[in-house]
Structure formats: structure tokens, C-alpha cells
Image (cartoon, rainbow, N blue to C red):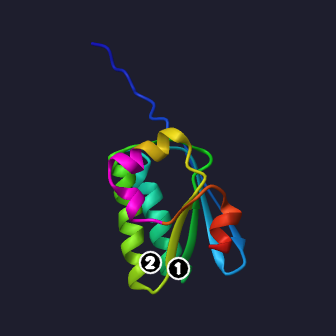
Amino acid sequence: MINEKRKVNIIMNIAEARQGNKLVVIPSGRIDSQTSPVFDRHLTAVIERGDVHLVIDLTGLDYISSTGLSAFLSAAKKVRAAGGSMALAGLNSRIRLVFEMSGFLRLFPIYATVDAAIVG
């Protein structure tokens, strides 16, 4: 009998930076079925602590799955309920296509850069 332990590589990092009255959340790597719960919890914690004007910088995002999209939708609902705003910036062509195919481009203001999103 072979006993094999599988190593799960969670390949996502989340950073934050404050610019004016907005918090920039910067996920990098992959938001997939393994990492989306972490991303969802992070966004929920950010919103619960009172940061409800968000810019999500997707410049470093390589991949997003449908479970990752659900984390964005959940956060958007919480932000709107709190009277805040949420914009996306820096979508590469692959990430933009996923958002477009799912109809999510209509749900969020999309900007080429974080600076453009901050100005609004």
C-alpha cells in the first residue's frame, strides 16, 4: 500500500495599500476553488472593519475561476449595503475575458490603472 500525501499549493497573495479615502486590495496569483475562500474572508474582514471604498488591483492576477467571481459578487453586495464603492483596475486580457463572459463587467466600474480608479 502506498501512502501518498499531497501537498496543496495555495498560490495567492493579498496586499493592501491606502490611497486617499480608498483602500487598494491587491490579490496576486490565482483565485480559484482553493484560494477564493481566503480572498472572500479577506474582503469581508476589510468591509467589516469599515473600509467600504475599495479598488481591487488585478494587475498581478493570473487566473480566476467561477468561485473567485462569486467572492467579488459577495463583496460588491456588502460594499453597496454599507454605502461604499468597489472598482476594479488592471485587468489583463484573460481576466477581462472571464469577467466579460460572466457578465461581471457590467457590475463593476473598470479602470486601466489603480490611479484612474482612485480618481474615478
Decide whether the magenta segment is chiefly helix, strand or loop: helix
**Pointer 1: residues within 10 angstroms few (<14), some, or many (20+)?**
many
Circles 2, 1 touching at the beta carbon (< 8 Å): yes
Q: Residue at x 44, y 77 (%)?
A: 79
106 inside magenta stretch: yes
Q: Which residues are magenta?
A: 98-108
Q: Quadrant of residue 8?
A: top left
Judging by the rendered image, the residue that carries numbered circle 1 is: 52
Q: Can residue 31 be seen from the camera position used here?
A: no
From this view, report whether residue 81 is shown above or below residue 87. Answer: below
Q: Residue at x 36, y 64 (%)?
A: 73
Which image quadrant: the N terminus?
top left
Q: Residue 23 at what x, y percent from top left?
A: 63, 72
- Relative placement, left or right, of 32 versus 22 is left
> In the image, what residue type sits under mark 1?
Val
Q: Residue 109 at what x, y percent from top left?
A: 50, 66
How far apart, in angstroms, are the residues tagged by discs 2 and 1?
Answer: 5 Å
Label 2: state its secondary structure: helix
Res 68 label:
none
- Relative placement, left or right, of 19 versus 107 is right
> In the image, what residue type sits under mark 2?
Val
Q: Nearer the viewer, residue 91 or 16?
A: 91
From this view, report whether residue 49 is shown above or below residue 24. Answer: below
Q: Can residue 14 be seen from the camera position used here?
A: yes
Judging by the rendered image, the residue that carries numbered circle 2 is: 79
**Pointer 2: residues within 10 angstroms few (<14), some, or many (20+)?**
many
Q: Nearer the viewer, residue 90 or 12?
A: 90
- First along the sequence among labels 2 and 1: 1
Label 1: state its secondary structure: loop
88 inside magenta stretch: no
